[in-house]
Amino acid sequence: MSDEDLKKLISSNAKAIEALTAEISEFRVGIDEMKQEWQKDRRGIYELLSRLARSQADFYETQSDFYRRFDEIDERQTRAFPNGGNLRGVARQARMLEILDRYLPPT
């Protein structure tokens, strides 16, 4: 191998090394961008999950309050009409359906 061939080979190898180094650098930048996007998406998902948990807690609290108030009404009716018998249960069901239909109309 002549000196000229050796210089061409060294130059070719240097260009290949530069190209690979640039490719690796671009790849690392791409990975860093993907990591940042992933972290942003992950934070968004955690935020949505926390909102969902708060909404569920609010719903269960409201549901509990609704049933508590309904039981208070039932207790008042029981005290007002002690001999109401089974009619009180039927009236309670009808009243509950009326309230539910008002807030959640049938489709």
Image (cartoon, grey):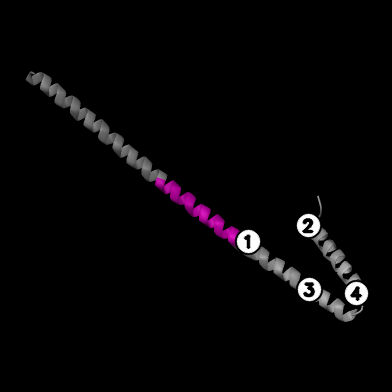
Q: Amino acid at mark 4?
A: Gly
Mark 4 residue element: loop
Q: Which residue is mark 1?
A: 55
How far, Cα to Cα, is label 3 from label 2? Answer: 20 Å
Residue 38 lies in the magenta-colored region: yes
> Which is nearer the eye, 86 or 97?
86
Residue 46 lies in the magenta-colored region: yes
How far, Cα to Cα, is label 4 from label 1? Answer: 39 Å
* Residue 76 on image: x %, y %: 84, 78
Quarter residue 85 falls in: bottom right
Q: Which mark is residue 104?
A: 2
The main secondary structure of the magenta stretch is: helix
Q: Amino acid at mark 3?
A: Asp
Residue under the image location 86 percent in, 81 percent down: 79
How far, Cα to Cα, is label 4 from label 2? Answer: 29 Å
Mark 1 residue element: helix
Q: Which residue is mark 4?
A: 85
Tell me whether the residue at label 4 lies in contact with that at label 1, contact meaning CB atoms closer than 8 angstroms: no
Residue under the image location 82 percent in, 77 percent down: 75
Q: Residues within 10 Å of mark 3 (few under 14, many from 20)?
A: few
Quarter residue 69 falls in: bottom right
Residue under the image location 78 percent in, 73 percent down: 71
Q: Residues within 10 Å of mark 4 (few under 14, many from 20)?
A: few
Q: Which residue is mark 3?
A: 71
- Foreground disc of the pair 4, 3: 4
Q: Residues within 10 Å of mark 1 (few under 14, many from 20)?
A: few
Tell me whether the residue at label 4 lies in contact with that at label 2, contact meaning CB atoms closer than 8 angstroms: no
Q: Earlier in the sequence, mark 3 or mark 2?
A: 3
